[in-house]
Amino acid sequence: MLNAHIKKITTRVTPPASAEIVHKICGCKWSLTVFDLLAQGINRPGEMVRSVDGLTTKVLNDCLRRNVEFGLISKATYSEVPPRVEYNITQYGQRFMAVLYDLEQLGPPPT
């Protein structure tokens, strides 16, 4: 009875930055599609919009900007006429995609 008041399990707190990234990326309808496009080598915004039905330039730009801020993708701007912009998955983004792939392989819970 002396040990009845000792807590055996503590609450685990999710790291705020990681939780925010997962929430914003998985909560965005297009982020995972953008990662898939980049993995296929489609790295120019115009080509991305043409490759996916329903994806608009505005939504794509918001998605790309957010992922650049998180450090998951990088943006390269070239001084050409017409201007050229390309996006690529960063090393950190590749690690993030590996986690997403592992979650996909986990599959749904057994019924």
Image (tube, helix red, strand yellow):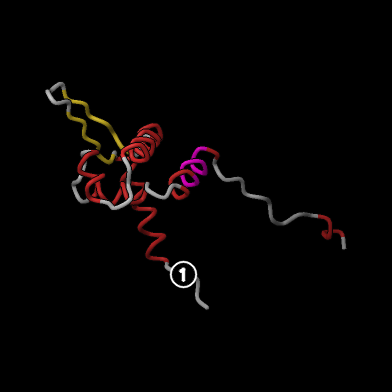
Decide whether the magenta segment is chiefly helix, strand or loop.
Answer: helix
Q: Residue furthest top?
A: 79
For this view, does 62 lie left or right of residue 15? left
Image quadrant holding the N terminus, namely: bottom right
- Which span of residues is magenta-colored? 17-23
Residue at the outermost left position: 81
Residue most toward the right? 1
Vertical relation: 109 (above or below) 11: below
Residue at screen point 24% across, 45% down:
48
Q: Tag 1's secondary structure? A: loop
Which residue is painted at 15% across and 21% down in the image? 79
Tell me if residue 39 comes above or below residue 60 in the rendering: below
Residue placed most toward the observer, 52 or 99? 52
Name the residue carrying label 1: 108
> How many other residues sit within 10 Å of disc 1, few (<14), some (14-19) or many (≥20)?
few
Question: Which x, y percent locates residue 71?
Answer: 36, 34
Magenta stretch holds residue 91: no
Quadrant assignment, res 60? top left
Residue in the foreground of this view, choosing between 73 and 14:
73
Locate residue 67, reporting x and y percent.
37, 38
Q: Is residue 18 magenta?
A: yes
Rendered location of residue 37, percent (x, y):
25, 49
Image point 34% across, 35% down: which residue?
61
Front-most of residues 39 and 94 = 39
Q: Quadrant of residue 66?
A: top left
Q: Residue at x 35, y 58 (%)?
A: 101
